[in-house]
Image (cartoon, rainbow, N blue to C red):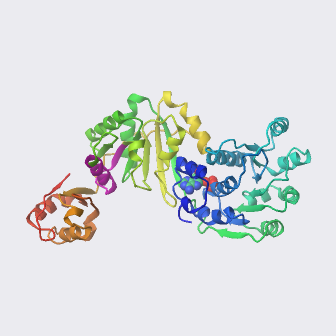
Amino acid sequence: MKSFADAALPPALLKALDSLGYQRPTEVQAQSLPPMLAGRDVRVQASTGSGKTAAFGLALLSALRTDTAELQALVLCPTRELADQVARELRGLARFIPNVKILSLCGGVSVRPQLASLQAHEPHIVVGTPGRIEDLIKRQALPLDRIHWVILDEADRMLDMGFIEPIGRILGQLPRERSTGLFSATYAEEIRQISREFQHEPVEVEIAGQAADVSIAQHFYKVEKQDKPAALQALLGERAPSSCLVFCNTRIDTRDVAARLQAAGFSALALHGELDQRERDEIVVQFGNGSCQVLVATDVASRGLHIEGLPMVIAYELPTDPAVHVHRIGRTGRAGESGLACALVSGREQGRIQGIEALTGMKLSWSALPNRSGKPQRPAMKTLIIDAGRKDRLRPGDILGALTGAGGLRGDEVGKIDVFATRAYVAVSRERAPSVVRALRQAQIKGRKFRIRDI
Ligand code: AMP
């Protein structure tokens, strides 16, 4: 499974994945989701950070019937913190499915409100710790007869905490016609034993390396509006990312922020909805080929950008909709790569943090701004425009040939080549750009002379 669209997921889940900014499945998801969607038992070796929660979450939610209020899935976790986190992630994935009730039931708090909540509305999914779940079963507060999915999350930690016996007793009471997912970072003999006893021909999934697939470091900075331009420059100077997308909530801000960055010596451009197609193309090309370090954009304008795995994104301001912020974060640190997501938050915007915490299931903390700001960097590349394109039958190979021939460049001094209908853009090493332009003005491409200049 290469993309989420390859799996037969209901539209509401695809929409949720989109709004959460999960564009590609992680390794665990790619390998474990297809068998789970087919109702197979799975035994997955995966640790926190691998995306395992969404892997089983998507399977549970795909198989859920919400036209009846019946308990259909049970997730057992070692700790209350993990159970709460799993319940939040499930709610995030279920945000476009109406009337789903997901309840977290753990020990350490009074059982009374839990009993009352179970009586008022039967949940569809329960996430809890084994001790409390067993207690609720004994009190006949949890109807087990419709459960068709059970997940043991972080089974090795549950074992360490002495939950092995309650788990056995709980599983022994569930309907036999069900699917069981066993997730664990390590596989001790006792866990294999549980698998042998309670699983039916499980599909085994092992993720090599065990490193987190998705690692995005998030930093939130308290900065009042008037101090944001300086804070932005300090962050860009200190981190010196090869490229960075800065999000603003309005078009006017994108222009203003980009202009201030330019004045401070940064290579920055603004992308917003009021540009014509050619202006837009030229900005996107320059950002995509490494000629422009910082792109300042509105959320809408950045949507069509096919630039993935950016090393850094910065929210100049928090959006009112938390899903938009999660989408922004999702532009950095794609599976397997690390990313940095920063947000500048004024006192007025601090109320928006809660919504983001609820949606991401993460407790956010504040970071301190760097004291000293580094110097603006010059991008490594510069973009040249050639006034000819596909209509002139100009192909990337012709341009590369001219640059390495008459232009005198080495292959590695030529970057990305974008050919449009009537124009072409090519990135070349910044230092060599003036001499290349001079040389190519004298030379021919495909036996013809074309206008060429830099931007
Ligand atoms: P987990 O291993 O379940 O604790 O997930 C680790 C983090 O990765 C969580 O913050 C998820 O929100 C995030 N995540 C899960 N799946 C994806 C995905 N396909 N793309 C991007 N982020 C993801």
Q: Is residue 81 above or below residue 396?
A: above
Q: In the picture provided, is 359 more to the left or to the right than 385?
A: right
Residue 276 coordinates in the image, percent (x, y): 27, 44
Residue reaching furthest left? 442
Residue 148 coordinates in the image, percent (x, y): 78, 57
Residue reaching furthest front? 67
Q: How many marks?
A: 0
Q: In the picture provided, is 103 more to the left or to the right than 25?
A: right
Q: Is residue 449 above or below residue 170?
A: below
Q: Is residue 30 above or below residue 105?
A: below
Quadrant in the rendering for residue 35: bottom right
Q: Which residues are magenta?
A: 278-296
Residue 126 coordinates in the image, percent (x, y): 76, 47
Q: Quadrant of the N terminus?
A: bottom right
Quadrant in the rendering for residue 307: bottom left
Asked if one can make out residue 240 in the rendered structure from this viewpoint, the answer is no
Q: In the picture provided, is 177 more to the left or to the right than 278?
A: right
Asked if one can make out residue 257 in the rendered structure from this viewpoint, the answer is yes
Q: Nearer the viewer, residue 221 or 396?
A: 396
Is 284 magenta? The answer is yes
Quadrant in the rendering for residue 7: bottom right
Is 211 magenta? The answer is no
Residue 197 coordinates in the image, percent (x, y): 84, 68
- Identify the residue shown where x is 80% and y is 54%: 147
- Identify the residue shown where x is 36% and y is 34%: 253
Q: Nearer the viewer, residue 105 or 190?
A: 105
